[in-house]
Amino acid sequence: RRSFRYFGNLIKMMPPRITFFGTPEYSIIVANTLFEAGFTLVCIVTKPPRPVGRKQLPTPTPMAKWSNSKKLPTILLPGSSEKPWLFADESEITKQVINYRPDILISADYTQKIPMELVKQTKLGGLNVHPSLLPAYRGPAPVPWAILNGETETGVSIVTLSEHFDSGIVISQEKDSILPTDTSNILLKRLFEIGAALIVKILPSFT
């Protein structure tokens, strides 16, 4: 007969239920690493399809395509027309995500601000994978700026979601050299690969 302590320890060992926020290919690197590591992605939040090409055909984001290939629930809600870095309806995204009962929110290369009300209602809050050594190079284009400024070193930060972009508590960082042959695309891919491995490593202790 198993004791209550056994079941308590079992619950502690259970991986957190994750809602993942992402849009481009770099987001997929992190989401897929979490998925393959056995973490439960209860839903994916990404942007709605947008017109692409000469015919302006509505095209899903790379993150939406990946999510659909894994048969994961996907939430598509538009941004504000006046302030595109915000959701058009923060209460709606909060309601929809909470319905999936995530333990933690994780974002990677997602340019819309995740509502603090949603963060507060999520058991473990949220983490963002940011491709710079915060507080250096906050904002949406840290890698191009680091290369343009002639930096020889950068890295990845795992930071808590906060009221302002990239201003939360830095949970973990890992440095990486900027090589003479690096382009923004090459370096971003490498940094998100490092960030994906880092967040998989720290999640058990974070929970």
Image (tube, rainbow, N blue to C red):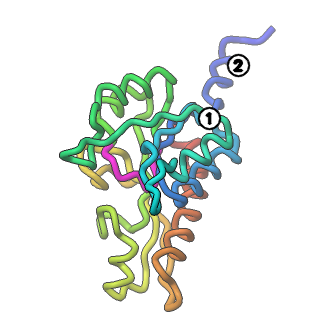
Reading the chain from its start, which is encountered first: label 2 or label 1? 2
**Quadrant placement of the N terminus:** top right
Asked whether residue 171 appears in the rendered view, the answer is: no
Asked if residue 8 lies in the magenta stretch, the reply is no
Residue at the top extreme of this rendering: 1
The quadrant where residue 141 appears = bottom left
- Range covered by the magenta-colored residues: 106-113
Asked whether residue 135 appears in the rendered view, the answer is: yes
In terms of depth relative to the viewer, which is nearer, 46 or 104? 46
- Determine which residue is flagged by label 2: 6
Residue at the bottom extreme of this rendering: 180
- Main SS category, magenta section: loop
- Determine which residue is flagged by label 1: 72
Asked if residue 107 lies in the magenta stretch, the reply is yes
Q: How many marks?
A: 2
Q: Residue at x 47, y 83 (%)?
A: 178
Q: Are marks 2 and 1 in contact (CB under 8 Å)?
A: no
Q: Amino acid at mark 2?
A: Tyr
Secondary structure under the numbered disc 2 in the rendered image: helix
Secondary structure under the numbered disc 1 in the rendered image: loop
